[in-house]
Amino acid sequence: MELFYFGFSYVLLLISIVNYFLIRTPWNSEVVENTISVLLPVRNEEKRISDCISGLKAQVNVPQLHVVIINDQSTDSTERIAIQETAEDGRFKIFNSEGPRENWLGKVSALQYGLENSDSEYVITLDADVILSPYAIASAINLLKDSKLDFTSPYPRQAAVTISEKLVQPLLHWSWMTTVILRLAEKFPHRSTAVANGQFFAVRREALEVINGFESVQTKILDDVEIARSLISAKFRGVVSEGSSLATTRMYENFSEIKQGYGKSLHKAFGGIFGTVAAISFIFLTGVLPVILIALGSPLGWLVYACIVFTRLMSDARGQSDSMYSLLHPISSALLIYLIIYSWRNRGNIQWKGRTV
């Protein structure tokens, strides 16, 4: 059993090493002549939208870029700021949605509205808390073209300021960096190995239209992973890519926001109760159990802890996170287990931007 446990952690280390060296990284920022539409759904984003729009306005080498901002019934100054920031830039259009369509969640409904009011060869979906570097969109589209992919999700750098952010946020990047061999998942696509992040997602419009846009994810809280699964089911190819040099986001600013943000989605993240139990078991084995074994004087605990810390160090290096917090992975794991349980206990009762989800 001890040998199996160490072997398990060693396999995770090997996967991390392979992904560290072979993950696709958008680097070609040559001019893209194709038409591109950015779909930017916004709801109560007055604190973030200005920086997001500034990043979009600064995009270079994309002469046929157009941005569709969908204001999803914001009750703050989001619309006013968006109008003010884009007034003299003809690349931007602002639409006011009438709220979610029947049996649709708000964000995906807004994305579908934006898709129907755009016409381009490539589609980018972007969250309002994302700030793009000037070559981000050109690099993402060139990656699709150069690699003959149908979609990619350049994973943004997860900016973290508070201790709680630094403990929790790097786990997003680490979770797939250690469990999915990305080049194999790209070559042999399967729904179970789909990885995506809707914060920054690029897709060929032709592929998106085959699956009827966002209709297949109209009730999905984790719409990004589900849209990737729908595309894979339709025989399209895509993969997550390293986007930490292209985009930056700060999802949450304190632990209260982290609880609400993860609370609305983690109970849906693992496919049901059995998947959730499996996920908690994985987190416990890789994060909490090594510390228990160390406390009991077992050398195995130190070996497993060392393997997992190395996986974190490689993930943090790629994702440009604070590597010091890799040493506190057991605390991060305990916090994530707590957040999963919190999400299950409060499912359907979380308030997010004025709506119950």
Image (cartoon, grey):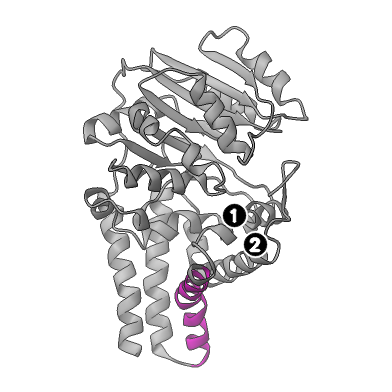
Depicted 87 relative to depicted 356: above or below: above
Residue at far front of view: 102
| Residue type for callout 1 | Ser
Q: Residue at x 59, y 61 (%)?
A: 267
Residue neighbourhood size for the residue with mark 1, other residues' Cα within 10 Å, grouped as few (<14), some (14–19), many (≥20): many
228 left or right of 125 in image: left
Which one is in front, 62 or 311?
A: 62
| Residue 299, magenta (yes or no) | no
Is residue 239 visible to the viewer in this orientation of the structure? no
Depicted 266 relative to depicted 43: above or below: below
Is residue 182 visible to the viewer in this orientation of the structure? yes
Residue 127: % across, % down: 55, 35
Magenta residues, start to end = 276-296
Q: Which residue is mark 2?
A: 343
| Residue type for callout 2 | Ser
Q: Residue at x 39, y 37 (%)?
A: 211
Q: Which residue is mark 1?
A: 265
| Magenta stretch secondary structure, dominant | helix
Which one is in front, 69 or 138?
A: 69
Q: Residue at x 59, y 31 (%)?
A: 110
Residue neighbourhood size for the residue with mark 2, other residues' Cα within 10 Å, grouped as few (<14), some (14–19), many (≥20): many
Calculate the distance from the C-alpha at mark 1 to the C-alpha at mark 2: 7 Å
Q: Residue at x 36, y 33 (%)?
A: 210
Residue 292: % across, % down: 52, 85
Q: Are marks 1 and 2 in contact (CB under 8 Å)?
A: yes
